[in-house]
């Protein structure tokens, strides 16, 4: 099965690219306005500089800041963003053309005024729009997969209870098994006991053994790599979250949510499968 993996770049790297692109666009805006103001009246000079800088900024953000991001859902209302940009641009042009100062000084003040407009608009309008959009499922078509659900259970030295864990998960997901299919994958992460054999005896559909012990993250990735389900859930071998909650997680993912996580502490977040 063709399964794609997305490498998520650190937020700090993306922030650095965002700042760099902003600095380049601002420089083009300032230099363009000041130079053109020596040739044309200030209004057309500033308008041309703004259009060039905005176009450059949009291209660079798309090609540099957001490159490789398959899940950039944060701009769903281009009209709202364009409206804010137009208002900020109008403030920039008005201040630059009306201030009786040298072009450079007037442009710097105009930039500051436009930046204040953007800050207020971002907080009052744009962030609210983004949060509202992200509070809705993406409504993507279902991904490929032979089964409806795969459950990955990383395990280390769990010989004593892995069989009971597999049985409990299978019982909790019996309805899913009858409606689309489910598989239980146990990843033995370099156990020193007979965890793998116990998982097979307990009825796991697939047992992956990795040597040496590489940690929970590596175990989860190994399970995901062999999973055949359209939705993949991982849970701990000690069942710190009751297995029946996987049904709620599955339902939320199938509604179109990108990611569903059980959490006992962050009760103010949007929770689709509440944890006890």
Image (cartoon, rainbow, N blue to C red):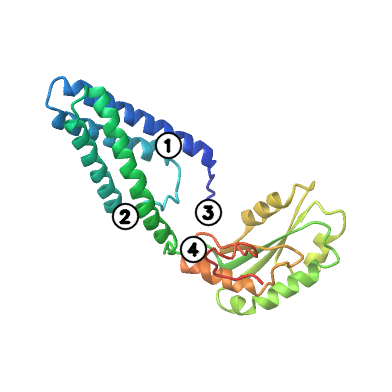
Instruction: Determine which of the numbered discs, if any, sits on residue 2 in the image.
Output: 3
**Marks 2 and 1, Cα distance to the nearest angstrom?**
20 Å
**Pointer 4: what residue?**
257
Q: Residue at x 36, y 52 (%)?
A: 126
What is the secondary structure assignment of the residue under circle 4? loop
**Tag 3: Cα neighbours inside 10 Å, few (<14), some, or many (≥20)?**
few
Q: Earlier in the sequence, mark 3 or mark 1?
A: 3
* On-image quarter of the N terminus: bottom right
**Marks 4 and 3, Cα distance to the nearest angstrom?**
21 Å
Q: Earlier in the sequence, mark 2 or mark 4?
A: 2
Badge 3 vs badge 2, beta-carbon distance below 8 Å: no
**Pointer 2: what residue?**
77
Q: Give the x, y percent position of residue 42.
A: 15, 28
**Tag 2: Cα neighbours inside 10 Å, few (<14), some, or many (≥20)?**
few
Instruction: Determine which of the numbered discs, if any, sits on residue 88 in the image.
Output: none
Residue 47 seen in render? yes
Quarter of image, res 230: bottom right
Q: Residue at x 27, y 24 (%)?
A: 105
What is the secondary structure assignment of the residue under circle 2? loop
What is the secondary structure assignment of the residue under circle 1? helix
**Marks 2 and 4, Cα distance to the nearest angstrom?**
19 Å
What is the secondary structure assignment of the residue under circle 3? loop
Instruction: Determine which of the numbered discs, if any, sits on residue 18 in the image.
Output: 1
Toward the viewer: 129 or 142? 129
Relative side of 146 to 71, left or right = right
Quarter of image, res 133: bottom left
């Amino acid at each position: 099965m063709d399964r794609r993996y997305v490498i998520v770049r650190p937020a700090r790297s993306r922030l650095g690219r965002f700042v760099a692109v902003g600095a380049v666009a601002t420089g083009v805006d300032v230099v363009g306005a000041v130079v053109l103001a020596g040739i044309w009246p200030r209004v057309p000079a500033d308008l041309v500089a703004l259009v060039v800088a905005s176009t450059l900024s949009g291209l660079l953000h798309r090609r540099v800041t957001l490159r490789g991001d398959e899940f950039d859902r944060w701009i769903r209302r281009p009209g709202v963003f364009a409206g804010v940009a137009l208002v900020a641009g109008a403030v920039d042009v008005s201040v630059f053309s009306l201030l009786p100062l040298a072009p450079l000084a007037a442009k710097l003040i105009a930039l500051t005024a436009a930046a204040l407009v953007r800050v207020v608009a971002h907080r009052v309008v744009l962030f609210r729009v983004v949060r509202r959009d992200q509070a809705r499922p993406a409504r993507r078509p279902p991904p490929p997969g032979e089964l409806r659900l795969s459950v990955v259970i990383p395990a280390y030295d769990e010989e004593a209870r892995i069989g009971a864990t597999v049985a409990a998960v299978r019982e909790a997901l019996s309805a899913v098994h009858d409606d689309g299919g489910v598989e239980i994958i146990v990843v033995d992460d370099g156990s020193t006991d007979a965890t793998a054999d116990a998982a097979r005896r307990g009825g796991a559909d697939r047992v992956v053994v990795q040597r040496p012990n590489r940690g929970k993250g590596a175990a989860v990735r190994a399970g995901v790599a062999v999973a055949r389900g359209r939705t993949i859930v991982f849970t701990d071998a000690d069942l710190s979250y009751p297995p029946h909650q996987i049904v709620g997680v599955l339902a939320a993912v199938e509604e179109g949510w990108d990611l569903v996580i059980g959490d006992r502490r962050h009760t103010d977040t949007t929770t689709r499968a509440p944890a006890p």
